Image (cartoon, grey):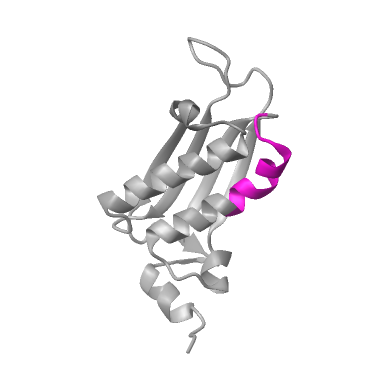
Amino acid sequence: MPMIELTAPAGSLTDTGRRTVQRDLAAIALKWEGLPDTEFIRSLAWAYLHELPAGAQTTAADDLPRFRVDVRVQAGALSDQRRDGLVREATAVVLKAAGLDIADAARVWVLIHEQAVRTWGAGGQVVTLAALDTAAPQTT
């Protein structure tokens, strides 16, 4: 049940990229977290797009747009291999959404935040992966 936030300068994404990047990032996070691809699980993968106003993002070197992807997952959900895959694919999605290529990959940072067990809350109660397994509609 990842939570994803993309922070990007306003106007730095293509029109198509702006429409698709959130769902694409959510799908990648679910894939690498190893969760089942069901409607219920997809409904729990929230993605936010934070567009910064002009001049709100810069570096000491230049004003080229930079992108930050913050991904929150439950602690222990990602092995090193899964983290590597998530970072690689999230970077590719953001580059595509911005109309950039692999040469610009250093302008995309993916920060993975592992939430300790019992630090997720929804519906007025603490949510655990075990509780989600119980709550998820069963398929046959």
Q: Quadrant of residue 106?
A: top left
**What span is colored magenta in the figure?**
12-23
Instruction: Report the residue that reaches farthest toward the bottom.
Output: 140
Q: Is residue 10 above or below residue 72?
A: above
Q: Is residue 55 above or below residue 84?
A: above
Q: Quadrant of residue 130?
A: bottom left
**What secondary structure predominates along the stretch shown in magenta?**
helix
Instruction: Report the residue that reaches farthest toward the left.
Output: 80
Q: In this view, does 15 lie above or below 77?
A: above
Find residue 18 and report its horizontal and vertical position in percent: 68, 42
Q: Can residue 125 be seen in this view?
A: yes
Give the residue drawn at x 52%, y 82%. 137
Q: In this view, does 23 lie above or below 53?
A: below
Give the residue drawn at x 55%, y 17%. 58
Q: Is residue 75 found inside the magenta-colored segment of the image?
A: no
Give the residue drawn at x 58%, y 66%. 43
Q: In which quarter of the image is residue 10?
A: top right
Instruction: Report the residue that reaches farthest toward the right.
Output: 15
Instruction: Report the residue that reaches farthest toward the top.
Output: 61
Q: Is residue 21 found inside the magenta-colored segment of the image?
A: yes
Query: Is 8 situated left or right of 111 in this image?
Result: right
Query: Is 115 situated left or right of 94 in this image?
Result: left
Find residue 25 and report its horizontal and vertical position in percent: 53, 50
Query: Is 12 situated left or right of 92 in this image?
Result: right
Find residue 7 and report its horizontal and vertical position in percent: 57, 35
